[in-house]
Image (cartoon, helix red, strand yellow):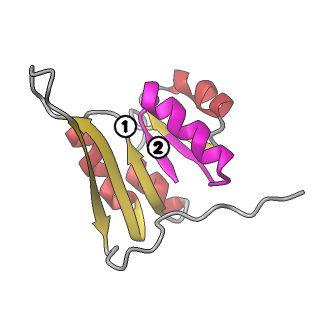
Amino acid sequence: MAIQGLGGLGHLGVQFARQMGFRTVAIGRGADKDQLARKLGAHVYIDSSAVDPAQELQKLGGARLILATAPDAKAMSGMVAGLARKGELCSSECLASRSASTPCRSSCKSRGFKDGRRAARPIRKTP
């Protein structure tokens, strides 16, 4: 499972993914966030300002699930190539509106994911 963005929501995503037993990959901008990502529980950190995160995810076998928490459409669309077959890219983004009553929305984009099965699987825990 990959988490794109290490802001407030990304921090929680990394911690929850790790505690749930997923092989967790954090994707952020800048080498300075590597230690933070690992402290939060990421197994791997990808610096998107230095390398192509989609290629790096494919080197790891592709992500079954990418949670995009950074509100950057260009960065999110580039992540699709990092998905494994039947993988899913989910983003949480607020609509650009000044209205306080405008709700946030969640959206998912899949890569061959049609049958509704779980997108991510926990890694095997060792004693």
Circle 1 residue: 69
Circle 2 residue: 3
The residue lying toward the viewer, choosing from 41 and 54, is 41
Residue 55 position within the rendered picture, expressed as x and y whole percent measured from the top left: 42, 55
Q: Name the residue at 29% across, 56% down.
A: 108
Mark 1: amino acid: Thr
Marks 2 and 1 in Cβ contact (< 8 Å): yes
Is residue 9 positioned above or below 121 on the image?
above
Mark 2: amino acid: Ile
Judge from the rendering whether residue 111 lies leftward or rightward of residue 44; answer left or right: left
Q: Name the residue at 46% across, 66% down.
A: 119
Which region shows up in magenta? 1-26
Callout 1: few (<14), some (14-19), or many (20+) C-alpha neighbours within 10 Å?
many
Residue 21 counted in the magenta span: yes
Judge from the rendering whether residue 53 lies leftward or rightward of residue 16; answer left or right: left
- Where does the C terminus fall, quadrant-wise? bottom right
